[in-house]
């Protein structure tokens, strides 16, 4: 079938709901996730190291919120933005108002904040807002995906996926719109953005020692199929294009590919290893331009590099441009990270 009717999709812009229950950030989950994205900063593993930087517990890697978001967004993609065979992630923005630490109890909001058609493709932006037990927003996450219709993939993909997906994950419906759809919108209540830790001196590099154009040291991250399976289990993203070759090729891909969120997690760890404090990041934006292929034999390699784009003496902060390459191609079309320095 072709793409669903664009005006009908546009009518669903602003659809909002809050996930029932909360997500409790566990110590071992923080460690598991840090291992899965190869982020070896000690604040993700060692309570003493975290305390030395002023944190109340282990600090989650920047992309950790993708875990509760994975479950939270399922309802939107199964009942609101429907009629597609699958979705391809194209852009991701993380806003860290304060670092999330073990013991935080998060409430997750979901809102369809963007609907647009570009070059005949339907693109959607989903915004997740994570609120702590005090009712303050600690993280915001904006995910942009492209809807892929059934006539763009091998017709066998749906049945193949159905036989491989985890037992409680529903294969997306391509049946189009539900006549009984009811739109719910965000309540008109102002959000309270967390300011906790704003006065904390970051454990990052000294601002006075930095200059525009400074280059970050190169880092290579190796990925095996085992790494992809491990990330799928830890994150909850069990899409078989990341571990099953026939499904990946039926979806029009050259081979199994790394999760976009995994590559972003690797990139965040690369920068925090240089800067010294993962909690000093205030914004991380990535536009995905190419996939990172991970063959069964030999695996894949991602080369990370970067440089300081700008520095602001008033806020003692800066913007870093991040470059990621796999197979000689840039997999990040544009990636930037805003960091507070000491």
Image (cartoon, rainbow, N blue to C red):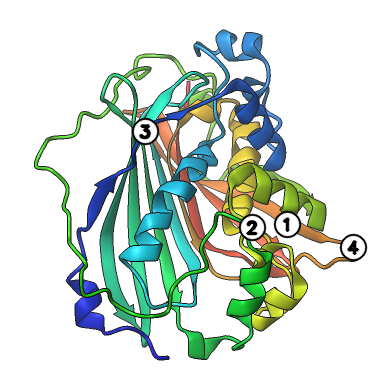
The reply to whether the C-beta atoms of the residues labelled 1 and 2 are less than 8 Å apart is yes
Above or below 304: residue 187: above
- All told, the count of numbered labels is 4
Q: Which of marks 4 and 3 is in front?
A: 3
Mark carried by residue 324: 2
Residue 322 percent across, percent down from the top left = 57, 51
Residue on which disc 1 sits: 302
Separation of marks 2 and 3 at Cα, in angstroms: 37 Å
Q: Earlier in the sequence, mark 3 or mark 1?
A: 3
Cα separation between marks 1 and 4: 13 Å
Q: Nearer the viewer, residue 171 or 4?
A: 171
The first of marks 1 and 2 along the sequence is 1
Q: Which numbered disc covers residue 21?
A: 3
Label 2 environment density (alpha carbons within 10 Å; few <14, some 14–19, many ≥20): many
Residue 224 seen: no
Q: Is mark 3 on a helix, strand or loop?
A: loop
Give the camera-side residue of 214 and 286.
286
Picture coordinates of residue 183, whole percent (x, y) = 17, 60
**Helix, strand or loop for disc 2:** strand
In-image side of 27 versus 136 (left or right): right
Residue assigned mark 4: 298
């Amino acid at each position: 079938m072709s793409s669903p009717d664009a005006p009908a999709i546009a009518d669903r812009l602003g659809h909002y709901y809050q996930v029932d229950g909360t997500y409790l950030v566990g110590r071992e989950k923080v460690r598991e996730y840090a291992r899965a994205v190869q982020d070896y900063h000690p604040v993700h593993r060692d309570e003493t190291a975290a305390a030395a930087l002023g944190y109340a517990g282990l600090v989650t890697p920047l992309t950790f919120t993708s875990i509760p978001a994975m479950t939270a967004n399922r309802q939107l993609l199964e009942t609101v933005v429907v009629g597609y065979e699958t979705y391809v992630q194209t852009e991701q923005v993380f806003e860290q108002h304060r670092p999330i630490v073990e013991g935080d109890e998060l409430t997750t909001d979901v809102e369809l904040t963007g609907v647009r058609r570009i070059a005949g493709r339907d693109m959607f932006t989903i915004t997740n807002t994570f609120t702590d037990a005090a009712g303050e927003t600690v993280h915001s996450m904006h995910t942009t995906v492209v809807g892929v219709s059934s006539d763009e993939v091998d017709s066998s993909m749906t049945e193949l996926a159905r036989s491989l997906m985890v037992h409680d994950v529903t294969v997306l419906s391509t049946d189009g719109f539900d006549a009984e759809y009811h739109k719910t919108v965000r309540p008109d209540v102002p959000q309270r953005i967390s300011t906790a830790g704003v006065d904390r001196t970051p454990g990052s590099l000294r601002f006075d020692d930095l200059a525009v154009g400074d280059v970050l040291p190169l880092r290579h991250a190796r990925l095996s199929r085992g790494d992809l399976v491990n990330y799928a289990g830890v994150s909850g993203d069990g899409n078989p294009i990341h571990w099953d070759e026939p499904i990946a090729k039926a979806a029009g891909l050259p081979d199994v590919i790394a999760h976009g969120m995994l590559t972003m997690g690797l990139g965040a760890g690369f920068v925090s290893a240089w800067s010294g404090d993962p909690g000093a990041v205030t914004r991380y934006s990535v536009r995905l331009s190419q996939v990172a292929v991970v063959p069964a034999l030999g695996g894949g390699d991602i080369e990370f590099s970067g440089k300081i784009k700008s520095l602001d003496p008033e806020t003692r902060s800066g913007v870093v441009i991040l470059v990621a390459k796999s197979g000689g191609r840039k997999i990040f079309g544009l990636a930037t990270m805003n960091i507070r320095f000491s």
